[in-house]
Amino acid sequence: MKVMAGFCWVLGFASVGSFSLQAASMNLVGVDAKLVSEAKTIVPGQTFTVALSLKHKDEYHTYWKNPGTVGVATMLNWDLPEGFTAGEVQWQVPERVTMVIYNTHGYAKDTWLLVDITAPKKLPAGSYTFKARAAWMTCAEKNCCNVAFQDLQLKLQAGDKKEWNDEVRSEITAAREKLPKAIKGWEVTASRSGAKITLRVKSEKGLPVDLDDALYFYSALSYVDTTVPQKVSIKDGELSVVFQINELSLEKKIETVEGLLYNPNAWPGSPGQKYMPLEVSLQ
């Protein structure tokens, strides 16, 4: 994370990545957070989904798994009952947000970050407490950025029959619709020349892509410099997106291009799907 002069950061913590802090919560500005579960009563071996719900106040945003050149991604550190395991965070598709004058990747709309939890195969009946220490950064274009920590928890019962929280389950189903979905039928390549990477995308069926200024590649990896505008062009039915490698990564060996390619008009042949997940070797 780059710290730019003139930002009024409110930190007071030792290490975001390791969740090193003394207070249980701090700087809860710009967002309301809570932990919710689709399950009320769970059974042995069951996998169920919980969510970190982030409700943003006007003008504030939080960050995607790769915020870009500035920002801090939201993180969860679990303290689960014995025998339970938690999967990776499932990130909804991001949007472009602005920290002062810097383009970043995040969420200005209310967001649910999903995590699948699996119960052990031997699970005595009773009450179980699931704890998570969450950390996030909230920023607004004309306001200070705040890093927040909060201890969250929820209690679930274990028994011999599944019971669902229908309201939360409905919200989680809606949140799953905002997860990126694979789009087939496209040839994708990536190459590097000096400090620039060019991503090339072409329909296997010759479907045309209209040039649009809002076409944008959300890199899931941190070597892309989001302060430099991307260059988008179309020639002979092939879409090209050129983006800059940041200074800290210029000497690194970059092997993969991974992220989401956004088309505001949706991808031809895939109605309603605006985000194309990509993971391609760099030539």
Image (cartoon, rainbow, N blue to C red):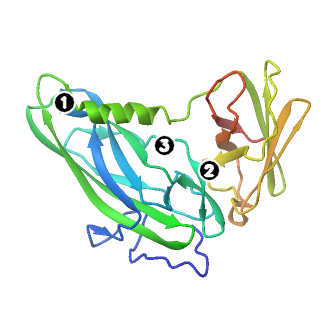
Q: Position of residue 243 (x, y in %)?
A: 77, 52
Label disc, if present, on residue 91 of the rendered structure: 3
Label disc, if present, on residue 221 of the rendered structure: 2
Q: Name the residue that disc number 1 marks.
A: 42
Q: Position of residue 124 (x, y in %)?
A: 9, 32
Q: Residue at x 26, y 30 (%)?
A: 166
Sequence-wise first label, 3 or 2: 3
Q: Quadrant for the C terminus, please.
A: top right
Q: Residue at x 50, y 66 (%)?
A: 139
Foreground label between 1 and 2:
1
Is 102 or 81 nearer to us in this picture? 102
Mark 3: which amino acid?
Trp
Q: CA distance from mark 3 to mark 2?
A: 14 Å
Foreground label between 3 and 2:
3
Q: Residue at x 74, y 26 (%)?
A: 186
Crowd band around label 2 with a 10 angstrom C-alpha radius: few (<14), some (14–19), many (20+): some
Q: Under tag 2, what secondary structure?
A: loop
Q: Is residue 34 visible?
A: yes
Q: Under tag 3, what secondary structure?
A: loop
Q: Position of residue 192 (x, y in %)?
A: 81, 48
Mark 2: which amino acid?
Leu
